[in-house]
Amino acid sequence: MDTFIGILNYLVFFAITAGIYAVLCLGLNIQWGYTGLFNIGIAGFFAVGAYTSALLSGPPPGPLDWRTVGGFQLPWVVGLLGAIIASGIIAFFIGLLTLRLKEDYLAIATIGIAEVIRLILKNEGWLSNTVWGIKHIPSPLHQPIEAGVSSFLKGHPQLSPWLVHFISNAYNWFYLALVLVILGLLYWTSERSIRSPWGRVLRTIREDEAVAAVSGKNVFSFKLQSFVLGAMVMGMAGSLYAHYAKFIDASSFEPLYGTFFIWVMLIIGGSGNSKGAVLGAFVIWGIWAGTEFLTGPLALSGTQAGALRVIVVGVLLELTLLLRPQGILGEEKIVSRMLKK
């Protein structure tokens, strides 16, 4: 029974992490899947959301910290809203400068801006505490839930050890429910959006900007809306990650984890399909996490295991592009079905 509870607890951790990646995928799906915006700067908005939320809701700087700002200890909801707003504002100004560029130039511009953001967070100690990062970021409702669990366990000393182990993980179950609720709301909103006139304009822009322009649509305005909305969703994911990990530094937002993985998830799941975005996040994170179990039997070092994970994901991406370029689910061709029900 203890083994089963241990596996269950690991699956909860897995689902929380995959759910956060799924939120990122939904944000990218708005930009690329719906509008065709080639954003390679996902990690930048992810980082902005995480740091904004941590600075608003996290503890004040410690005596050994270089950071001199933040630590307002505001409620988590305020941190989440701050992350969404900050990511949206930054995306707005980036979009004004870059969205008139063609796909490849837009990709170069966004990855460059994301690296600028990451390097600022890595080097500006007054803001981010440099490589030492921000520690002790509080999780929402952590103290009351942990206090309730502790009180319950003290009042029931006769419980079996496996049940104590299970109940002790109650907060992770709560956080999983929180992530899934947010993911569900984003999925529902995304589905409604793409089936609305606004969403159909985005698809038209993706397929042929000239047709959208001739139809009287302000192409640049719609692109900007899509870019900002997707970035706000990415900032939301950053807040969820920061308050779950309780520690962030610039290395948490390297292009491999913050950008490349998200693109692989969306491509394999199915670009332009919200279900595919969520499915791709869980599939790729499952493969990435699953390769950890090969480290022991194959006697691999940490570096070798990391390389194996990248190779497995890369091979899967190549096979998907060759055999099923539309992804596992592919894009739905009819998007007005929901409105007819």
Image: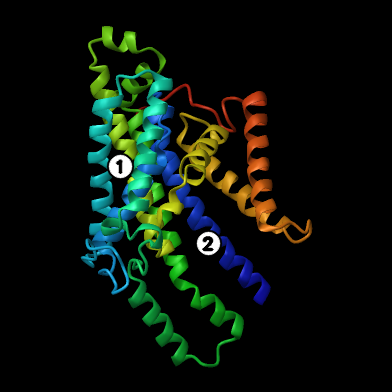
Q: Quadrant of residue 176?
A: bottom left
Name the amino acid, label 1: Met
Residue 234 shows in this picture: no
Q: In this view, does 133 lie to the left or right of 261?
A: left
- For residue 269, the mark is none
Q: What element carries label 2?
A: helix
The residue lying at 64 percent from left, 48 percent from top is 287
Front position in the image: 59 or 34: 59
Instruction: Tell me the quarter of the image containing the C terminus.
Output: top left
Number of marks in the image? Answer: 2
Image location of residue 280, percent across then percent down: 55, 40
Instruction: Please say if the residues under marks 2 and 1 sit with CB atoms less than 8 Å apart.
Output: no
Crowding at mark 2 (Cα within 10 Å: few <14, some 14-19, many 20+)? some
At which x and y percent is residue 137?
34, 66
The quadrant holding residue 4 is bottom right
Q: How far apart are marks 2 and 1 (CA)?
A: 24 Å
Q: Is mark 1 on a helix, strand or loop?
A: helix
x, y percentage for residue 29? Answer: 42, 33
Q: Name the residue under label 2.
A: 13
Residue at the spot x=32%, y=54% of the render? 51
Q: Where is residue 93 in the image (x, y as percent from the top left)?
A: 23, 33
Q: In which quarter of the image is the N terminus?
A: bottom right
Q: Is residue 70 above or below residue 256?
A: below
Mark 2 and mark 1 lie on one chain; the one further toward the N terminus is: 2
In the rendered view, tell whether residue 231 sits above or below residue 78.
above
Give the residue number, with chain letter if any, for mark 1. 232
- Left or right, 183 with respect to 297, comes to left
Q: Is residue 76 visible?
A: yes
Q: Nearer the viewer, residue 292 or 233?
A: 292
Which amino acid type is marked by label 2? Phe
Q: Residues within 10 Å of mark 1 (few under 14, many from 20)?
A: many
